[in-house]
């Protein structure tokens, strides 16, 4: 994994794209930063901000640049320097300084998709990008796959030469080389495994499945996390989607499934919209879900069982293809070194409610059978003690049940 001491746990924060798309400006970004440290809500009676929970990075996505069709390059000058649209971002350094004054980190965006840079691999563009990144005081960098600057090893070499440790996201969608690490090479801190997520259940399930192949191979690991894209929680379709959004149970399934596979948890909703924040606060502030996401005990989490029955989920009109998945999927993540604790998420993608059993002897790495303590993660409440199986688990359509199981102490 990228050996810069960063992202040893899945990164948490916020990024502008899913809700705001290209409709961004410096005022919006600084207001989001203020919202990330707002303590007007509570957890367990204690005033708590999003940053208190771990969501401490604020990332600017695409459309900060000046686009030009009548020059040699689309948003760089002849020396390779990126050209910032000063009408909407008059002072990038002041913006990152504001983040730092609040105890936040600030993320930037490169190899842009809006007016993607023309087909040139000249090193001066990489050098100009890195110089601007450092001059503006950013801490993290999402490097997309749309333009010509695809050499992430070169970016890494240039960043390392500055002496500053930077959290880097490889946003090559699981398809534009280089898009996946090896066990001894990962010049980024997390990597997109899929195309853009949409605010629909079919898209969530499709993107989730794109992480599975990186789980048992341990290619998703501390410092190099598999990432199925930002969260659509609270976005209600967003500015970039044109789709209807997720209902409450689908939103919960989305958040829980990202958490159990150790995906970075990157919000994108309007944190200053009180109605939206009230709707999703109990979900995104659930400390037990966050604890599961942030834990590392040798495996990032993934599926261990799928029902024989399958369902086909139709994408929204305008998006290609359908998604076929197991009607029920069982995901797990080890929560102790000795196999005594494990998190399990059971998803129901069927159109109707189902009742399932969770057998303890089927859960990989878990050594509990008799006297297993079961806890509901969503409700943060103990369920009881069980032998062999937690039976009669009712799951609504498109919902997920989230459990922590702990083996009987010897």
Image (cartoon, rainbow, N blue to C red):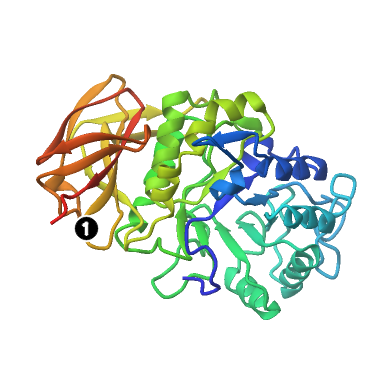
Q: Callout 1: few (<14), some (14-19), or many (20+) C-alpha neighbours within 10 Å?
A: some
Q: Within the image, what quadrant is residue 401 found in? A: top left
Residue marked by disc 1: 339
Residue at the extreme front? 45
Closer-to-camera residue (132/257): 257
| Residue 255 place in picture, x, y as percent | 45, 38
Q: Is residue 270 above or below residue 183?
A: above
Q: Residue at x 53, y 55 (%)?
A: 11
Q: Is residue 161 above or below residue 293?
A: below
Closer-to-camera residue (113/183): 183
Query: So how many labels did they put on this image?
Result: 1
Q: Does residue 400 appear to the left or right of 68 in the view shown?
A: left
Closer-to-camera residue (288/230): 288
| Residue 230 place in picture, x, y as percent | 54, 44
Closer-to-camera residue (3/32): 32
Q: Quadrant of the C terminus?
A: bottom left
Residue 16 visible somewhere in the drawing: no
| Residue 197 place in picture, x, y as percent | 51, 40
Local SS, label 1? loop
Q: Does residue 1 appear to the left or right of 134 in the view shown?
A: left
């Amino acid at each position: 994994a990228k050996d810069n001491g960063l992202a040893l746990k899945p990164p948490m924060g916020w990024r502008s794209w899913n809700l705001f798309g290209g409709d961004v400006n410096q005022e919006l970004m600084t207001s989001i930063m203020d919202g990330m440290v707002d303590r007007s809500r509570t957890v367990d009676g204690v005033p708590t901000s999003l940053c208190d929970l771990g969501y401490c990075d604020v990332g600017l996505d695409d459309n900060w640049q000046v686009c030009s069709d009548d020059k040699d390059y689309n948003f760089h000058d002849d020396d390779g320097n990126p050209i910032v649209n000063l009408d909407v971002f008059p002072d990038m350094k002041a913006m990152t300084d504001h983040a730092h004054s609040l105890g936040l980190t600030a993320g930037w965006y490169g190899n842009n998709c809006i007016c993607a840079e023309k087909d040139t691999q000249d090193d001066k563009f990489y050098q100009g990008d890195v110089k601007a990144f450092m001059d503006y005081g950013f801490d993290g960098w999402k490097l997309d796959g749309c333009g010509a600057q695809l050499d992430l090893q070169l970016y890494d070499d240039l960043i390392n030469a500055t002496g500053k440790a930077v959290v880097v996201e490889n946003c090559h969608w699981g398809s534009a080389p280089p898009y996946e690490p090896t066990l001894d090479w990962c010049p980024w801190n997390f990597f997109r495994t899929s195309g853009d997520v949409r605010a629909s259940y079919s898209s969530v399930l499709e993107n989730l499945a794109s992480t599975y192949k990186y789980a048992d191979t341990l290619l998703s690991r501390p410092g190099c996390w598999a990432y199925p894209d930002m969260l659509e929680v609270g976005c209600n379709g967003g500015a970039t989607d044109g789709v209807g959004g997720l209902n409450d149970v689908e939103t919960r399934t989305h958040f829980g499934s990202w958490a159990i596979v150790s995906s970075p948890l990157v919000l994108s909703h309007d944190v200053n919209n009180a109605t939206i924040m009230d709707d999703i606060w109990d979900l995104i502030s659930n400390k037990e879900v966050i604890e599961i996401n942030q834990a590392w005990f040798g495996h990032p989490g993934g599926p261990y069982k799928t029902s024989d029955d399958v369902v086909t989920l139709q994408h929204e009109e305008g998006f290609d293809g359908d998604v076929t998945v197991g009607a029920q999927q069982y995901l797990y993540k080890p929560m102790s070194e000795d196999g005594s604790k494990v998190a399990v998420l059971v998803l129901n993608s069927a159109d109707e409610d189902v009742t399932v059993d969770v057998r303890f002897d089927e859960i990989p790495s878990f050594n509990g059978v008799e006297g297993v303590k079961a806890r509901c993660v969503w409700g943060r409440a103990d369920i009881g003690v069980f032998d062999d199986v937690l039976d009669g688990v009712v799951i609504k359509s498109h919902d997920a049940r989230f459990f922590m199981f702990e083996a009987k102490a010897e």
